[in-house]
Image (tube, rainbow, N blue to C red):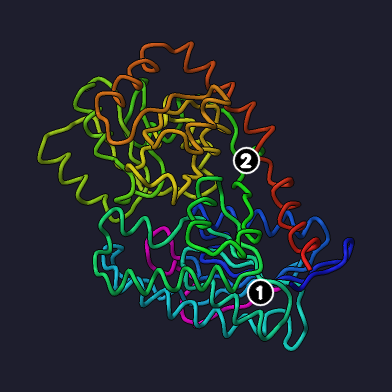
């Protein structure tokens, strides 16, 4: 493998689907990794998308060009057209957009920071999975090693939720997945569960390339706050206990559990904050069944994340059965940083239940089980002192285990130590 000597300033090209000010969770992750690596003295050239995540369309003031380049103190940022579809539910349209986006990213990546300057490595992020081969393409032209960061394992989640059923499409996606891993010099997974999933798909000679580096949270930006926020007032919620889900409203999340809990506890306010392919069907169900204590809210600017999370007294992390080995909801760390307890409905023995058990910051129950989910919520709803104590424990845990600086140094070490 290609490598650099310890102590050398790295020159890296970073390929990712979102970057600040785009407010997607993966954008927040990669933005912080880049800034932490820059603080270590490295030169970075980011190739990402124009901001589009919030409305699933290019944001006002950013359109009109196929790409935009800006210089920074640590390198540069190139933002290219993401080719967004009008709806997240049109899977083929989204796939076509990802391919076009990845192709333009690849073309821009070979000149990012000045071609033909040799680089020390490429850091590519999935999803979209197509950025893996884009990273390999960049490496072929620019040199260095390719580190492939996997936030969610595709196509496993799409297959298990039924989002993709066509065997030919699944076969092509699994071929692309395997080839992308094999072309990478290092593959970074968020948990031991995801590492085992990927290892099972590769021959043993590739296993040494797999690394586990969890995501992190900015504990200085997301802090415990007073529950009676301005955000509550905007939603029309008084001082009732609030149970909140904040994140992607997709079919991987068992948000039907939230509606069932709302029906069982009509005096509690339930907030679903975010957007995604499942939101409309959930809103239709709320309307058709006259569930009056569920509030839907759009994504808020990243600057308000701490306030939004503080508005919830209890946060929920529901994930459908079988998906914990392909996805780790990074929202958990943000919730713990905000000092709020968690009820997680997720496969037992996986990363989130282990974290909650280790930190004492919440309760984990079996996925897709309404009775257990509602019972766990009722325990925390009825005991404010218990909620507060769990919130303090979660904040303490995340301060010691999920700092951005420590995570960035682990990425740095991969480039410095591999040959």
Q: Which residue is drawn at 89% across and 61% down?
A: 7
Q: Residue furthest left?
A: 288
Q: How far apart are marks 2 and 1 (CA)?
A: 25 Å
Indicate the quadrant where residue 383 lies.
top left
- The quarter of the picture where residue 156 lies is bottom left
Crowding near the residue tagged with mark 2, few <14, some 14–19, many ≥20 C-alpha atoms within 10 Å: some
Q: Residue furthest front?
A: 204
Instruction: Please state the horizontal and vertical placement of residue 101, each as a whole percent of the image.
Output: 46, 77
Q: Name the residue under label 1.
A: 70
Q: Which of marks 2 and 1 is nearer the N terminus?
A: 1
Name the residue: 46% across, 45% down. Answer: 329
Q: In the rendered image, which quarter contains the N terminus? A: bottom right
* Residue 419 quadrant: bottom right
For label 1, count other residues whose C-alpha is less than 10 Å away and answer few (under 14), some (14-19) or many (20+).
Answer: few
Q: Which of 13 and 308 is in front in this view?
A: 13
Q: In this view, does 141 lie above or below 232?
A: below
Task: For mark 2, give the secondary structure.
Answer: loop
In the displayed structure image, the side of residue 274 where residue 402 appears, left or right: right
Per the rendered image, the range of residues in magenta is: 52-71
The residue located at (76%, 64%) in the rendering is 415
Q: Would you say the magenta stretch is mainly helix, strand or loop?
A: loop
Residue placed at 67% from the left, 86% from the top?
Answer: 141
- Residue 209 in the image: x percent, y percent? 64, 61
Residue 362: % across, % down: 47, 24
Q: Residue 221 carries which label?
A: 2
Residue 57 part of the magenta segment: yes
Q: Which of 164 and 318 is in front in this view?
A: 164
As drawn, is 201 to the left or to the right of 418? left
């Amino acid at each position: 493998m290609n490598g650099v000597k310890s102590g050398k300033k790295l020159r890296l090209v970073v390929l990712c689907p979102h970057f600040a000010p785009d407010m997607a969770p993966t954008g927040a992750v990669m933005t912080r990794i880049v800034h932490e690596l820059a603080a270590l003295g490295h030169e970075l050239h980011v190739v990402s998308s124009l901001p589009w995540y919030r409305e699933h369309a290019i944001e006002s003031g950013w359109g009109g060009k196929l790409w935009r380049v800006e210089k920074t103190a640590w390198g540069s940022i190139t933002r290219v057209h993401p080719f967004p579809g009008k709806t997240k539910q049109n899977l083929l349209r989204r796939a076509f957009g990802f391919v076009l986006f990845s192709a333009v990213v690849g073309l821009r990546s070979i000149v990012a920071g000045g071609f033909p300057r040799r680089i020390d490595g490429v850091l590519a992020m999935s999803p979209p999975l197509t950025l893996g081969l884009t990273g390999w393409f960049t490496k072929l032209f620019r040199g260095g090693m390719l580190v492939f960061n996997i936030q969610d394992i595709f196509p496993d989640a799409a297959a298990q939720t039924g989002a993709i059923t066509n065997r030919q499409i699944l076969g092509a996606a699994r071929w692309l997945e395997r080839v992308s891993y094999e072309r990478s010099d290092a593959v970074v997974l968020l948990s031991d569960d995801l590492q085992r999933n990927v290892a099972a798909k590769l021959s043993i000679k590739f296993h040494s390339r797999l690394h586990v580096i969890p995501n992190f949270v900015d504990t200085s930006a997301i802090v415990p706050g007073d529950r009676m926020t301005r955000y509550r007032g905007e939603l029309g919620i008084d001082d009732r206990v609030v149970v909140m889900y904040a994140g992607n409203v997709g079919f991987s999340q068992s948000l039907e559990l939230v509606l069932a809990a709302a029906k069982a506890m009509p005096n509690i306010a339930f907030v679903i904050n975010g957007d995604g392919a499942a939101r409309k069907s959930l809103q239709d169900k709320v309307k058709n069944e006259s569930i009056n204590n569920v509030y839907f809210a759009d994504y808020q600017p990243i600057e308000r994340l701490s306030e939004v999370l503080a508005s919830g007294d209890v946060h929920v992390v529901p994930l459908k059965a079988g998906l914990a080995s392909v996805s780790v909801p990074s929202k958990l760390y943000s919730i713990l940083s905000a000092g709020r307890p968690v009820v997680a409905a997720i496969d037992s023995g996986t990363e989130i239940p282990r974290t909650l058990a280790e930190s004492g910051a919440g309760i984990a129950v079996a996925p897709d089980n309404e009775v257990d989910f509602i019972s766990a919520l009722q325990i925390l709803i009825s005991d404010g002192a218990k909620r507060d104590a769990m919130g303090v424990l979660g904040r303490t845990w995340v301060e010691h285990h999920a700092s951005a600086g420590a995570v960035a140094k682990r990425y740095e070490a991969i480039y410095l130590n591999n040959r």
